Amino acid sequence: MNIAGRTLLNTRISNCYSTSLFNLHRTSTPFHSSSLPISNKVINTHLKPSKPNNLKYSTTTMASSYIKSEQARVPPALQLPTPPITKFKIGLCQLSVTADKARNIDHARKAIEDAAQKGAKLVVLPEIWNSPYSNDSFPVYAEDIDAGGDASPSTAMLSEVSRALKITIVGGSIPERCGDRLHNTCCVFDTDGKLIAKHRKIHLFDIDIPGKITFKESQTLTAGEAPTVVDTEVGRIGIGICYDIRFQELAILYAARGAHLLCYPGAFNMTTGPLHWELLQRARAVDNQLYVATCSPARDAGAGYVAWGHSTLVGPFGEVLATTEHDEEIIIAEIDYSLMELRRTNLPLEKQRRGDLYQVVDVLRS
């Protein structure tokens, strides 16, 4: 069985009594942003192998039960699609963020224009760039993205500037209001200014490190329920937001769907940033043999939440191609998708996976 599609399923073979696959939304054509609506029906898929009579239950038998299960069958990974463009420049705009929303929007516009002037065909903004990063601020700065216009001045600006400059924009993230719920949401705009994808942060940042940092997004935000893969003028892109990068299953799923590039607007903090920010980016890139781009707000030592900074582009061999420190800066770097094929030829991970020992599941395609 070809199991090259990849969302890790931990079978815990020796003493597993039941295993639950993580839940994603079903769409008819999951490879385009328009096929990933925000409010689809959740699919719950569970594997419940019979309870073994004793601890000597054979791992071979257990593995076979998964392989035979219809629920464990996985479509093969998609062949990497031919991108519309092979080589282009990306701009990562590490922006300072203030309590002045109008200033933040105007500042982001100027940064995007600067990046485009320097040749960027794809521009990425930071996580929560129009608002201070705090649970108190999210409800105040939230916008109704679906309503657009005056109800969402931040995305109206992104639409306008992407159309005027004929560039693709991964618009970082902003607080989104949808009915009585708030989300941390990233919008992607094409060269015609059309909103082609909207990713709501799937994994909420709830962390408690005594003496270091405590922050719980779930106090105000609702988690998204769908992965986001979108075809753009600069290739197929998988979108995650900050804490999403810690969950390798999401990146594996995106790679299995043929993503060339993963974009993670993020605001890692001063505790986990030095330890994990670059490490996670390189891990996601080298594990999946694709490009990873991240964009952080600039550091403000006086803010309630202090961002680590260090926006970065990582290549498909895990190499850091471009990065910055913590101050405000625009990074311009080159992406060359032909290197992905080279790296995958050099190190053929796709052909070496052990489907007899572990499975991966993308419930949207199973």
Image: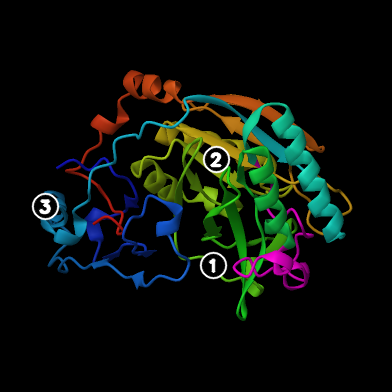
> Looking at the rendering, in which quadrant would you find the N terminus?
top left
Distance (Cα) linking label 2 and label 1: 21 Å
> Looking at the rendering, in which quadrant would you find the C terminus?
bottom left
Position in image of residue 48 (x %, y %): 21, 68
| Residue, far bottom | 180
Q: Is residue 198 magenta?
A: no
In the picture provided, is 36 more to the left or to the right than 154?
A: left
Q: Secondary structure at mark 2?
A: helix
Position in image of residue 101 (x %, y %): 83, 60
Distance (Cα) linking label 2 and label 3: 33 Å
Q: Which residue is mark 3?
A: 64
Q: Are marks 3 and 1 in contact (CB under 8 Å)?
A: no
Q: Residue at x 35, y 45 (%)?
A: 257
Q: Nearer the viewer, mark 2 or mark 3?
A: 2
User: Which quadrant of the figure has residue 138?
Assistant: bottom right
For residue 358, above or below residue 155: above
> Is residue 345 something that shows in the picture?
yes
> Is residue 98 something that shows in the picture?
no
Q: Which mark is residue 280?
A: 2
Q: Secondary structure at mark 3?
A: helix
Position in image of residue 260 (x %, y %): 44, 35
Q: Is residue 129 magenta?
A: yes
Q: Secondary structure at mark 1?
A: loop
